[in-house]
Image (cartoon, rainbow, N blue to C red):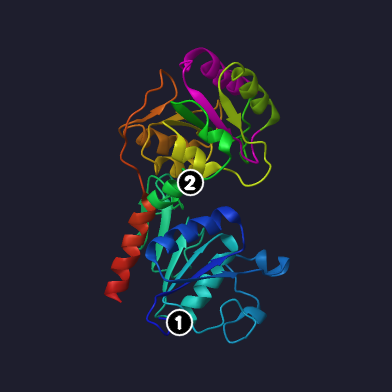
Amino acid sequence: MTADGERKIWLLSDGKAGDENQCLGVAERLGGDIEIRHVNPSKFWAMAMPWGPIPFADHPDRETSPLHGPFPDVAIASGRRAVSYLRTLKKASPQTLTVFLKDPRTNSLNADLIWVPFHDARRGKNVMATLTGPHRVTTEVLRHARTTGPQALHHLPGPSVSLILGGDTAKEQFGKAASRRLARYLSDVLPSHFSVMVTPSRRTPDHLMAAVRQALQGRPHWIWDGEGENPYFTMMALADAIIVTADSHSMLSDVLATSVPVYIFEPDAYPEKLKRTIDQLVQQPWVQRLDGPLETGDRAPIDATELIADEIRHLLKDT
């Protein structure tokens, strides 16, 4: 605890945005004094992670170490390099409740709680699995986002749909045939009175963007051009429905935390493990594959972040 009795939380990460945002999402739900501790082992040490030790210079007794105390009440980590650091922290401070997000790819991690997505195989007494993952989308974030972002978004006629685009993954490409399928839906199936807000990602291929642009000609729309801050939250907050590509578990988790219908567009190829999750998600009300007319309505958010935070609160009471 801090001097004023506030819970002290460390986040351990190598700075990768996706991992760090998941840790922040959980920590912000818990509440407390949150401190990000970045780990940066040299290539020599990183090659042995997550199984090996941390560099001697990063041992907790060194003042320049990311693990130098006073130790926190809770430590939340994600990313391969952070595994060894979380393991070392637990040995140095057994009273710290340690949490790892995603599969650590080793059985040597002595964390109090490991969260994994449903489609991962890891299970155990200290393992929690949920359909969606941790995120930073909250009612308060969306309420604020409704009044921010580019003015052009606020002037689009309703109803509006947000199109959240992923793209190529490590093993699969978002093929041109899939781009044409999505474009045909936008031009031929999506009712003409819908306006469209589009945000691509760093993984979105040029041919997908070209197909989407062509399909939206003659319809009110706005496409983020990559300049300035991505109005991702604003698009979700203003949408009456959301279309999201199936290639990212993080994107699926974000949009499912809203309260509008979600339609999942499946490329011709995307990670097989995500197909297992989507098979389960489409059993929820107002969550469907994009294979028919789009509707609007109210949907109960699917929020794994609060479930993870609740489990940590439960564990803290038991310690």
Asked which secondary structure carries label 1, the reply is: loop
Residue 72 among those drawn in magenta:
no
Q: Quadrant of the C terminus?
A: bottom left
Residue at 49% over, 56% down? 22
Q: Is residue 35 left or right of residue 296?
A: right
Where is residue 18? Give x, y as percent.
56, 53
Q: Which mark is residue 93?
A: 1
Question: How busy is the neighbourhood of tag 2: few (under 14 within 10 Å), some, or many (20 plus)?
Answer: some
Asked which secondary structure carries label 2, the reply is: helix
Q: Quadrant of the N terminus?
A: bottom left
Question: How busy is the neighbourhood of tag 1: few (under 14 within 10 Å), some, or many (20 plus)?
Answer: some
Extent of the magenta region: 176-204
Q: Amino acid at mark 2?
A: Ala
Q: Which mark is residue 268?
A: none
Q: Amino acid at mark 1?
A: Ser
- Along the viewing direction, whichever of 102 and 202 lies nearer the viewer: 202
* Residue beneath disc 2: 145
